[in-house]
Structure formats: C-alpha cells, structure tokens
Amino acid sequence: MADIGRFEDEFLQYLRHAPGSPVEQVAETGDLTQETEDSLLENLESFMDSFTTSDGTILGKEAEAEAMDQAEVKQEKLRVPRRPSA
C-alpha cells in the first residue's frame, strides 16, 4: 500500500518535469484533449518502466518466465479426415 502513495507522488513529480508536460497543458487550457490524454498515457508507460516497488519489481517489466522442464513438454497430434477427391 505504501507503494501507491509513492507512485502517485513520484509520477506527478515526473509529469511536472516532462517536456511539454501534460499537467501544464491542462492547467493552461483547463481542458483534457485527446492529445493531452495520449501524452499522459505515454508518460505513464515511460514512468512505469522506471518505477521500482518496495519489493524490487519494476512495474513496466513483466516477470521473466522460467523454462519448462523438458519432461513436461508434450505434443498433441490432430487427425483431420480428408474428403475424397471429386
């Protein structure tokens, strides 16, 4: 839960220092345009790639998958009946 507040604080700080900040755009115009929304989403993705949670996980990165044991790998065979040639 502590990560939520820290994420919010750090993301807002990140946005305030972003070039062409969407926060500035909204403050100046009082409007949330599609362009501003797109900018917010791009900034969010970029920020998530750098935010590390208290357990050391980076939000924007998917956990690396472990390889399956070769003995667990199985193959299925499908049989499709062929229609007789006309």
Image: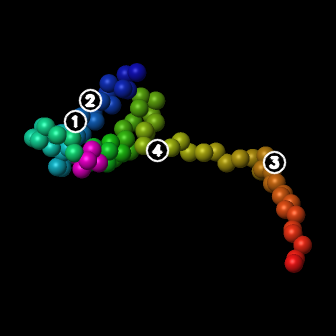
Image location (x, y in percent) of residue 45: 36, 45
Distance between the alpha carbons at the discs numbered 3 and 2: 48 Å
Residue depicted at 88% across the width and 63% down the height: 81
- The residue that label 2 is drawn on is 9
Q: Are marks 3 and 4 in contact (CB under 8 Å)?
A: no
- The residue that label 4 is drawn on is 61
Label located before the other in sequence (4 or 2) = 2
Image location (x, y in percent) of residue 48: 37, 41
**Residue density around tag 3, few if under 14, some if 14–19, many if 20 or more, within 10 Å:** few
**Badge 2 element:** helix
- The residue that label 1 is drawn on is 13
The answer to whether any part of residue 25 appears in the image is yes
Closer mark to the observer between disc 3 and disc 2: 2
- Disc 1 marks a residue whose amino acid type is Gln
Image location (x, y in percent) of residue 73: 78, 50
**Residue density around tag 4, few if under 14, some if 14–19, many if 20 or more, within 10 Å:** few
Please tell me whether residue 82 is drawn above or below residue 45 in the rendered image. below
